[in-house]
Image (spheres, helix red, strand yellow):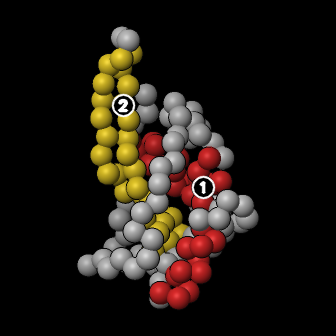
Amino acid sequence: MALYTEIRDELKIRVATVTSLRVFDTWPEVPLVPCAIIMPEGGNQRVALGVFRTTFVITILLQLGRYVQAQDALDAYLSTSGASDLLGALEGDRTLAGKARTLTVGPWESYGVLNIG
């Protein structure tokens, strides 16, 4: 099974296919918007039917700038087609170049303004 850094690197490659979106696989000192930041949230390890499995929970945080422009940009990233389709970019290779057994995209949350810092 792959190391977390390999999974994170492959996610960065997938997200980087989205038009006009900078991607950081670690928290940037200065996040230039628009950008996506790949952040570990948690995970678990278990054995089922004699098979050891690790599950990573990873959040992709989008920072998009001023509210009105950011809202329009966010709408495009959450679309299900087009050059800004983030979901399509992630699902374009569910094995992340063979580093993962599968990739499952969960729900999006905190749609709107988020203060950081």
Could you tell me how far apart the alpha carbons at marks 2 and 1 are, in whole angstroms?
23 Å
Quadrant assignment for the N terminus: top left
**Where in the figure is residue 96, as x and y percent of width and height?**
56, 41
Splitting the image into 4 quarters, where does residue 61 fall?
bottom left
**Where in the figure is residue 102, as x and y percent of width and height?**
53, 34
Which dot, 2 or 1, sits closer to the camera? 1
Q: Secondary structure at mark 2?
A: strand
**Which residue is pictured at 59% across the width and 65% down the height?**
78
**Which residue is pictured at 43% across the width and 33% down the height?**
2
Q: Is residue 75 above or below residue 8?
A: below
Give the residue furthest to the right.
Answer: 82
Q: What's the residue type where badge 2 is placed? A: Thr
**Which residue is pictured at 31% across the width and 40% down the height?**
43
Splitting the image into 4 quarters, where does residue 47 fall?
top left
Q: What's the residue type where badge 1 is placed? A: Leu
Residue 87, label in figure: 1
CA neighbours of label 2 inside 10 A, class few (<14), some (14 to 19), many (20+): few
**Where in the figure is residue 79, as x and y percent of width and height?**
65, 65
35 with respect to 97 (left or right): left
Give the residue furthest to the top.
Answer: 50
97 with respect to 28 (left or right): right
Residue 54, label in figure: 2
75 with respect to 65 (left or right): right
**Where in the figure is residue 29, as x and y percent of width and height?**
34, 73
Q: Is 52 in front, or is 25?
A: 52
**Which residue is pictured at 44% across the width and 76% down the height?**
112
Q: Is residue 103 above or below residue 69?
A: above
